[in-house]
Image (cartoon, rainbow, N blue to C red):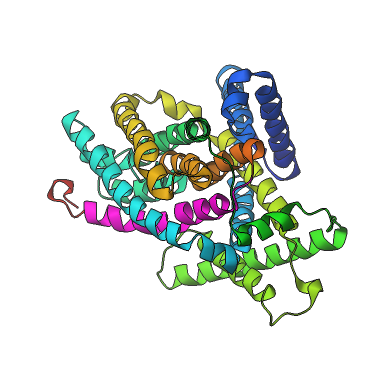
């Protein structure tokens, strides 16, 4: 007899925080994890994920995690990403962002080309190459479910499960490979943080002790976050009603951008209306860590025992080697070969194999030890969540026009 328990609300948040601190303890006592700066949420979430699997397999206790609660923290995270996008910092990273968008177009195309080529040469369906390509690796679990449903409607059975297997493995790889690669680049090229005037101002405001945390500042920031999330969700619902499909977090991110730049402008002279950069950073970090930990806890390990995993493992292995080589020799160099570039490369691996929050977790984990990089914290989520999502959709549509997909 199997007992089912639904983990939500305060119970879920409590367990998530416990998982995060268990990862924190492990990292501080295991030299390998500490030296390679693997995010606490990845380690703690994996530990609890395994625990949930053991309870289900050996004790008949099935724990279901509330995905909606996880997605709320995702929306808060992307809202604060938008609220960190002040015009001055954006302009500083503008040229580099444009170059990296072109690089990502090239990468996504190659990622799907490699996936389809390996699938065909190994005797698997070409669709598997896309499912173990940008659909699940860059797109993550949500994109894997969306495209999997589409493929199943066209007669490709089990497409959702295959996509989820690939996304699960990719999430694990993105969280464990990205940070070590970034650290290696920092040591190899003896890199140190160096910021422009706008970034120095941003960093100074972030760490300034002249603006202590207060109930007013916390609630003010949280109010604007809630408003941005609510308005962004309404915009997303309206656009979906009109037939325009986009990621749920995208309108929320843009609302955050608009609000912060309006409040920061000369049209709002009152200091009481200015949002504290430190408060935005705090909510960003907290929501990021909770979302990453919940995401790792939510991984269903039984997918990894699917009999079809053998054909996927070969594709994912080749994809992982390609992503690491591309990040090390192409992305890092085009990004500028400086400290910011090393952290962006760690974020690139998180995006290329896992998801944007994992990419940010990689960047945050390294910056805690070696110093802040406002440019990386800004470019990585924009590159991974906004532009790469658009690139991914266009690229997949073009690939499906190839004759051997028979769509």
**Residue 343 spot, x, y in % from top left:** 52, 42
* Vertical relation: 69 (above or below) 33: below
Residue at image x 18%, y 55%?
401
Q: Is residue 237 left or right of residue 321?
A: right
Q: Main secondary structure of the magenta part?
A: helix
Badge count: 0
Q: Quadrant of residue 87?
A: bottom right
* Vertical relation: 189 (above or below) 151: above
**Residue 159 spot, x, y in % from top left:** 33, 40
Most extreme residue toward the bottom, as rendered? 267
Most extreme residue toward the top, as rendered? 58
Q: Quadrant of residue 199?
A: bottom right
Residue at image x 41%, y 43%?
332
Which residue is more in the foreground, 89 or 79?
A: 89
Where the N terminus falls, by quadrant?
Answer: top right
**Residue extent of the magenta highlight:** 372-399
Residue at image x 35%, y 42%?
330
Q: Is residue 396 highlighted in magenta?
A: yes
* Vertical relation: 167 (above or below) 393: above
**Residue 351 spot, x, y in % from top left:** 45, 44
Q: Is residue 77 left or right of residue 214?
A: left
Can I make out residue 2 in this image? no
């Amino acid at each position: 007899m199997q007992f089912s328990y639904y983990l939500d609300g305060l119970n879920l948040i409590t367990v998530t925080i416990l998982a995060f601190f268990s990862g924190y303890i492990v990292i501080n006592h295991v030299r390998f994890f500490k030296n390679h700066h693997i995010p606490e949420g990845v380690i703690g979430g994996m530990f609890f994920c395994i625990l949930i699997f053991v309870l289900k397999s050996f004790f008949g206790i099935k724990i279901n995690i509330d995905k909606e609660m996880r997605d709320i923290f995702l929306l808060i995270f992307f809202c604060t990403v938008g609220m960190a996008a002040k015009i001055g910092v954006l302009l500083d990273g503008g040229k580099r962002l444009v170059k990296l968008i072109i690089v990502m177009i090239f990468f996504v195309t190659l990622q799907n080309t490699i996936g389809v080529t390996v699938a065909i040469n190994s005797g698997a369906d070409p669709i598997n190459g896309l499912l173990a390509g940008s659909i699940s690796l860059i797109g993550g679990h949500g994109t894997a479910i969306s495209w999997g449903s589409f493929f199943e409607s066209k007669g490709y059975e089990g497409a959702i499960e295959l996509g989820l297997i690939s996304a699960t493995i990719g999430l694990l790889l993105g969280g464990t490979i990205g940070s070590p690669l970034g650290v290696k680049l920092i040591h190899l090229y003896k890199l140190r943080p160096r910021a422009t005037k706008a970034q120095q101002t941003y960093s100074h405001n972030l760490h300034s002790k002249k603006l202590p945390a207060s109930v007013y500042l916390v609630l003010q920031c949280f109010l604007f976050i809630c408003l941005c999330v609510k308005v962004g969700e309404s915009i997303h619902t309206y656009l979906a009603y009109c037939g325009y499909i986009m990621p749920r977090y995208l309108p929320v991110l843009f609302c955050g951008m608009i609000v912060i730049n309006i409040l920061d402008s000369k049209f709002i002279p009152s200091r009481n209306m200015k949002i504290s950069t430190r408060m935005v950073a705090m909510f960003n970090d907290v929501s990021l860590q909770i979302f990453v930990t919940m995401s790792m806890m939510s991984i269903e390990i039984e997918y990894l025992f699917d009999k079809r995993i053998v054909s996927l493992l070969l594709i994912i292995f080749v994809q992982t080697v390609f992503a690491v080589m591309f990040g090390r020799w192409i992305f890092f160099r085009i990004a500028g070969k400086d400290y910011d570039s090393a952290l962006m490369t760690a974020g690139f691996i998180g995006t290329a194999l896992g998801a944007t929050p994992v990419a940010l977790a990689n960047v945050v984990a390294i910056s805690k030890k070696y110093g802040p990089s406002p440019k990386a914290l800004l470019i990585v989520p924009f590159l991974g969540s906004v532009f790469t999502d658009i690139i991914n959709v266009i690229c997949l549509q073009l690939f499906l026009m190839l004759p051997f997909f028979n769509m």
